[in-house]
Image (cartoon, coloured by chain):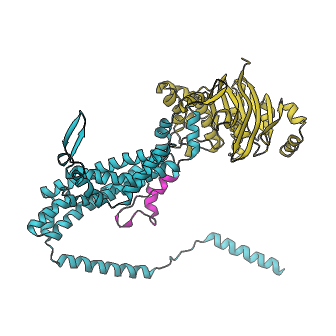
Amino acid sequence: MALEAAAGSQRVEVEALRQRSYKIVRLRHPGRWLAGAVVLALLALLVQAFAHGQIQWKLVGQFLTADVILRGFGITLLISALAMLLGLSLGTTFAIMRLSANPVTRFVAWLYVWIFRGTPVLLQLLVWFNIALVFPRIIIPGVFEGRTVDIVTPFIAALLGLGINEGAYMTEVVRGGINSVDHGQTEAANTLGMSRFQTLRRIILPQAMRLIVPVLGNSAIGMLKTSSLAAAISCTEMLNAAQQVYFVNGAVIELLFVCAIWYLAATTVLSIGQYFIEKRYGKGTSQARSRSSFKLPFGLGSAGTPALEKAQ
Amino acid sequence: MTGTIVKAINVHKKFAGREVLRGVDLEVRNGEVLCILGPSGSGKSTLLRCLNHLESVDDGVVWIDGQIIGYVLRDGTLKELPARKVRRQQREIGMVFQHFNLFPHMTALENVIEGPVTVRKEPRASAIARAEKLLASVGLAERRDAYPAQLSGGQKQRVAIARALAMNPKVMLFDEPTSALDPELVGEVLDVMRELAASGTTMIVVTHEIGFAREVADRVAVMVDGEIREMGPPAEVLANPTDARVRSFLARVLA
């Protein structure tokens, strides 16, 4: 009897639960609000300090679009793009050499990476800048002859220094990408009768790209900033141009800020471009597509904003 | 039509000192379906991979359509062929892998036309027309633009079969084509293979599907410890095996 009664009352309760819905009270996070307020206050202090510091913001605005700065920025972009291109071609070539069955080519590729990854890029830039001390003349018999100082201008020296250095890093990146592709892919290509080169170009490299491209984006951003080292070998990229101006007018911080603004603008554009390229190379793998989330400034769009991820 | 298309004599293969194949002889006639059965580790897949030179043999000779695979016989020695010539031989031999090995960055259609267009230099339009027919024949006409990641295991394997057929191979090798599939997807792949066999395609199939072997194969071979212990019509071999190891293997899988 008692048992029956208990079962009966339980049934009533289940019915009651089915009928009504409950209001859910979210857990409050007062600590987050406090931390947010503290950080905002500190940020406000910092902004205020700079606003009232010895900086002529008007000058920053003026020089932001000055011819000499814009021309320097153009050279910065050009050097970065060309050096990346050189780095990528060298990297792909040496990566394939490192994976070759020939021990000599393997060793040469290893040597390249060892030397150019193992020495500072500033030192390499200085060596290329002063290469005329070693080879006063460049001679290709019957084709070309000239003084090295005329050929290896600061621009060319910067290009060689940055590009060859980048190539050493790219070698490792491309090698990792190629190694990540399943060996079954090569076997499938073999059974279709594809040559080594066809297999590499049509099957392996496109898949390796998925691993390479995200790194490539970071490298491009890094290259844009590292190219400022070319200022040290009197290549008139943006930082060098800014220095030349502030040696005359003394507005050191103002001009450095101008450069900072342009560098930030360029790196921001690059990260947006990286997002779209990654999406393209994620083709055919649904996981890759949903995993690559676009990182907006302030960390928006990363983990913790499911709405944005769904929108992709 | 009844000529020999695949012939292997005294094939040996070692991996790290372990003998995986110990002198295998094999002969497959044009249009014949041979199923190779045997416990795992018996060398079935290795034998198949030796037939198309994905593995090089340590001893013995393999002929496909009268040509020695991977070597040329001159003055009583076998000389290794350059990779370019090996590829030329390999494209006459279709292969279907256990794990499909579809190209993940290409659609089903692109997978199927890759060989004809890149290797055989067939005009794209005619390759596409043929590929569409092949995809239709494996029941996947409407999935031509799907990437492998969007296909089920059975669909992937059917695309892989179409991809191999696109090269008009003289013989099709199947390396455990249904072993990586969910049980309910095995049937659709076996159906395609059954039709293929009925159309007169020469097939060598390494498989665990005894039922398929019994029904479709002209002959079955049972491998144990790197040797073919028993070979003949399925009715004979499966019903009255003479070799003790073969008998115990069949007793286990037929149970």
What is the x, y in percent for residue A93? Answer: 41, 44
- Magenta range is A287-312
What is the x, y in percent for residue B217? Answer: 78, 30
Q: Is residue B185 left or right of residue B148?
A: right
Number of numbered discs overlaid on the protein picture = 0
Q: Is residue A288 magenta?
A: yes
- The answer to whether residue B195 of the structure is visible from this angle is no
Q: Name chain B's colour.
A: yellow
Q: Is residue A75 magenta?
A: no
What is the x, y in percent for residue B181? Answer: 68, 45
Q: Nearer the viewer, residue A195 or B182?
A: A195
Q: Quadrant of the N terminus of chain B?
A: top right
Occupied quadrant, residue B2: top right
Chain given the colour cyan: A
What is the x, y in percent for residue B196? Answer: 69, 28
Q: Is residue A7 left or right of residue A40?
A: right
Q: Nearer the viewer, residue B158 or A164?
A: A164
Residue that sits furthest to the left in the current view: A248
- The answer to whether residue B57 of the structure is visible from this angle is yes
Image vertical order of residue B152 relative to residue B163, above or below: below
Q: Is residue B134 left or right of residue A173?
A: right
Q: Residue at x 37, y 54 (%)?
A: A217
Q: Residue at x 16, y 53 (%)?
A: A71
Image vertical order of residue A55 relative to residue B3, above or below: below
